[in-house]
Image: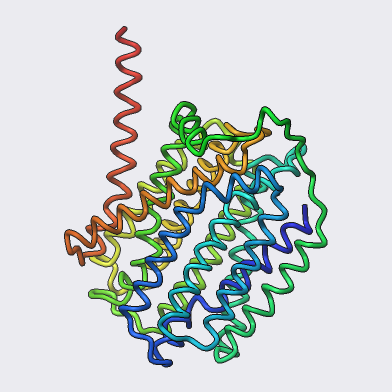
Amino acid sequence: MYRILSAHGLFNLARAFIGAVLIIYLTNHGISLSVIALAKSAQLIVSVLFNYPAGLISDRYGNKVTVLLACVAEMIYFGLMLHPSEQSVITGEMFNGLGIALYTGAYEAWIFTHKKGSEDSFSLISRSAEMLFIATIISGVIGAIFAQYSLHLSLAFMTVSLAAYALTPEKRKEIKEDQIVTSAFSGVTKLIKMADSNVLNFMFIGGLMQLLYQFWPVFFKDSPIHFSQKEVGYVFAASMIAQWFFTSASRKKSFNKKKYAGSVCYLGVLLSSVLTLLSPLYLQQYPVAIVLFYCVFISFCTLTTNYFFSQSCNLFSHAQDESSMISLLDTGARCIGALSLAVVSALNMENITFIWMAFPAFILLTSLTRISKRVLSYGL
């Protein structure tokens, strides 16, 4: 298990090196923002289109093979970005999307083979998230010092990740001929039939988190907060540390096994989102408090996503098509995230407070729906 987690940390470390500097690097090489936007759109389309087929490949040929292919795709992506042109940037982002699609589902299905005792789906997902946050923090420190070598560092660490995964043994499932998926739509049908409230909660909260990832810098740079670029960087570091702490603590306390886990997730997202949205209006003189509320907000969102994702994955635990079903879960969340961003773009929304109201609105709507169902069931 720890060998897979270490390789996963290296994989995310390689990807995180270029996160903060890639757009600046590309614009400095004459690549326009419109081309970058087109390339990112191509990445999203490829990742969504290939997500489920990648899961089928993983189920048929093994998680290890699929993860190794993901590493190769990412290495090609980094290589194409070293000497950027309009064509290489678009092609590179398409390989990036392919790498994301191949990695999603295959990695989770692989790490889930190590379920044992206290190491359940939630624990393993939390451990993976912890590695992601640690890798992001480390990459931020190293990247700040060696920013001009970010792509070379990404390529080097992805090569090490490839080697680490190649040396890690895999527990393969025995697949009988009559269990091989023959229909590309059988997984979608299965997901629709088996989907419960956990699946819907994961897809919607996971999708809405795109609104956090895309707009949090604007939230802190706009009026009335007016943080500098350096201060925004500190907020990012603080949010990573907070998410790591929440994830680690919830895993050690076996949070997912508590009867009140779902209610705590709902209440935490609701209260922290409202406090975050109101704090700039009433706590302008206390910027640390604003940052603290935001860190708690994004940490509760991460905890909630991890909790409902683990519950959703349990529906397909030990199934022969586990990897492809996990990929479908991720695809659903990505589609909702893309739809949310499309709505923001179509309505030309610029007020981040109004955009983030989607979180408390969803929690309240879901809670009212659950209460209504209980009242009706008692009435009958």
* Image position, residue 88 (x, y; %): 47, 80
Q: Is residue 104 left or right of residue 285?
A: right
Quarter in which the C terminus is drawn: top left
Q: Is residue 312 above or below residue 145?
A: above
For the point 57% across and 35% down, which residue is it? Answer: 182
In the picture, residue 354 is in which quadrant? bottom left
* Image position, residue 195 (x, y; %): 46, 31
Q: Is residue 154 above or below residue 189?
A: below
Viewer-nearest residue: 48 or 240:
48
For the point 37% across and 77% down, which residue is it? Answer: 36
In the picture, residue 325 is in which quadrant? top right
* Image position, residue 291 (x, y; %): 40, 68
How many numbered tags mark residues here? 0
Viewer-nearest residue: 307 or 241:
307
Give the residue at the far top of this rendering.
Answer: 380
In the picture, residue 152 is in which quadrant? bottom right
For the point 42% across and 81% down, which residue is it? Answer: 23
Q: Is residue 91 above or below residue 273?
A: below
* Image position, residue 284 (x, y; %): 28, 72
Viewer-nearest residue: 297 or 177:
177
Q: Is residue 357 left or right of residue 201?
A: left
Q: Is residue 354 above or below residue 270?
A: below
Q: Is residue 333 left or right of residue 241?
A: left
Give the residue at the far left of this rendering.
Answer: 347
Q: Is residue 351 left or right of residue 289?
A: left
For the point 67% across and 48% down, which residue is it? Answer: 124
